[in-house]
Each structure stands twice: as structure tokens, then as C-alpha cells.
Amino acid sequence: MSKATDDTTHFGFQDVPASEKAGMVHGVFSRVASKYDVMNDLMSVGIHRIWKDAMMDWLAPRPGQRLLDVAGGTGDVAFRFLKRAPGASAVVCDMTEPMLIEGRKRAEAESMAQSLDWVVGDAMALPFPDNSFDVYTISFGIRNVTRIPDALREAYRVLRPGGRLMVLEFSQIPNDLLQKAYDLYSFNVIPAMGQIVAGDRASYQYLVESIRKFPDQETFAQMIREAGFGQVKYRNLSLGIAALHSGWKL
């Protein structure tokens, strides 16, 4: 496996031209959009719902706040946020329009339509002014970004002073034996499940590879600090299978 350079980046375990990754990721999520929510439940045995609830518990949404949920896809996080914060508003931003279309079909989307907007956009070049949001969230999306530092700088830019960043992402289990067991499950079960349920083994092979390429908890926390955030902390979920990272625009 070769090391990516400034002109290349990782697409799973492949090195690809950096200019092509966004299009490749777009293709993955366009193909799986209609089965995305079903596969999330199957792959995590429903635990992703507990992780997102834990995200909201730590975030503690407040009435009247404005949320930007990047790579928000079908709206899971935005719906949870709005249910906990009367008078709040949310923008779901995703580069893949088919994911947003699936989100708008959900019953929650109709009941929250007055508080919720859906925008096609790139995490590395957000189509919003500076200092526009109180909260920025991204769940299981930042590992798919071509240049993660650029996305974190954009998060800092669009947050108001005092605003909060929260990232939910797959991470690394700090126990080699448990990590190996989890890898066996990921690489053998999830792509096969993707083939059966979504008719797409390759996309889910990429998704599990992308998890293993993502930085560990401490490395990612340092990336958040380097983007300008303060009070950066993280919490492991399910032994470190996933992690929540929090930072503030001070």
C-alpha cells in the first residue's frame, strides 16, 4: 500500500488523484442512498441510534440555536437536534443530492419543514457566510472528505464565536485483540451485507476501508485544535468503535 502525497489521497485502501476523490465518494453515496438507513441499522445492529443520542446528550441543544449538519444525508442528526430544541432551526448540507432526497421523504422532514433546510454543498467549501451557525455537526462523514483540515477550517469559519463543533465518527479500539475481532467482522460481513441488501459490495468495501484509514482519537483531536478550536475533548463509544469529538470556537 503506497503512501498518499499532496496530489493523491486515500479512497479506502487505494491511492487516487485528490481531484477525483469527491466524485468517487459522491458515486458511493448516490448508489447506496435508497438503502442507507436500512444498512446503518443492520451494520451496527441499531447501535448507531444510541451513538447519535449520546451525541445529542453531550451537545445539549438549546432553544433557538441554528444547526449546520454537514454530510447530514437523510437527516438523522438534524431531526434529533430539532426535537430537543424548541424554536431551533437546522440546515442539512450534503454533497450527494440523492441522500437529501431520501431525507426529505421521511416523516420527520414533513413535520419539521418550517425549521429545516436541505442544501447541496461541499464540506471543504461551504456555501454559507462567516459566523452563521451556533452548532456544526458531522456524523460518519468527515472520513470521506478529501482534505479533512480544509473541512475543519470551514467548520470554524461558519460557526459564530462561542459556537460548537461536534464530530461523530468511527474510530480505533485501543485494544489490539478487540480491534482485530472488529476488523474481521467489518471486512467479512459488511461488504457481503451490502451486496445482499443494497446490491453493492464495492461501496461497502470502500466504507469499511475508509474507517481503517481514519486517524485515531488523539490524532484527530490535534487536527481539530490546529483548525483553531479550543477545549477539544473526545469520548469513546462502544469501546472506541466510534468516538465523539467536541471543540469550541472561542
Image: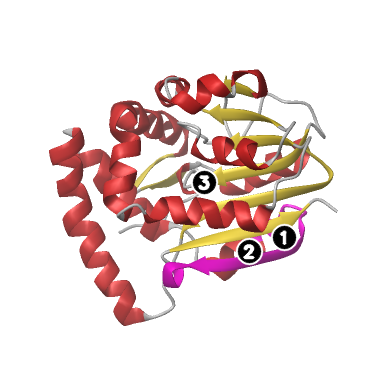
Dots 1, 2 in contact, CB < 8 A: yes
> In the rendered structure, which amino acid carries the disc numbered 1?
Arg
- Label 2 sits on a secondary structure element that is helix
> In the rendered structure, which amino acid carries the disc numbered 3?
Ser
Residue 81 sits inside the magenta stretch = no
- Label 1 sits on a secondary structure element that is helix
Dots 3, 2 in contact, CB < 8 A: no
Residue 177: percent from left, percent from top: 30, 81
* Most foreground residue, 183 or 16: 183
- The mark found on residue 225 in the picture is 1
Q: Which residues are magenta?
A: 223-240
- Residue at 40% over, 21% down: 98
* Most foreground residue, 50 or 197: 50
- Residue at 58% over, 21% down: 119
> In the rendered structure, which amino acid carries the disc numbered 2?
Ala
Residue that carries the numbered disc 2 in the rendered image: 221
Residue that carries the numbered disc 3 in the rendered image: 139
Relative to residue 118, is residue 234 depicted above or below?
A: below
- Residue at 45% over, 31% down: 74
Residue 94: percent from left, percent from top: 52, 29
Quarter where residue 89 is shown: top right
Quadrant location, the C terminus: bottom right
Foreground disc of the pair 3, 1: 3
Residue 165: percent from left, percent from top: 69, 49
Relative to residue 53, is residue 240 depicted above or below?
A: below
Please give left or right for residue 172 compared with residue 187 in the image. right
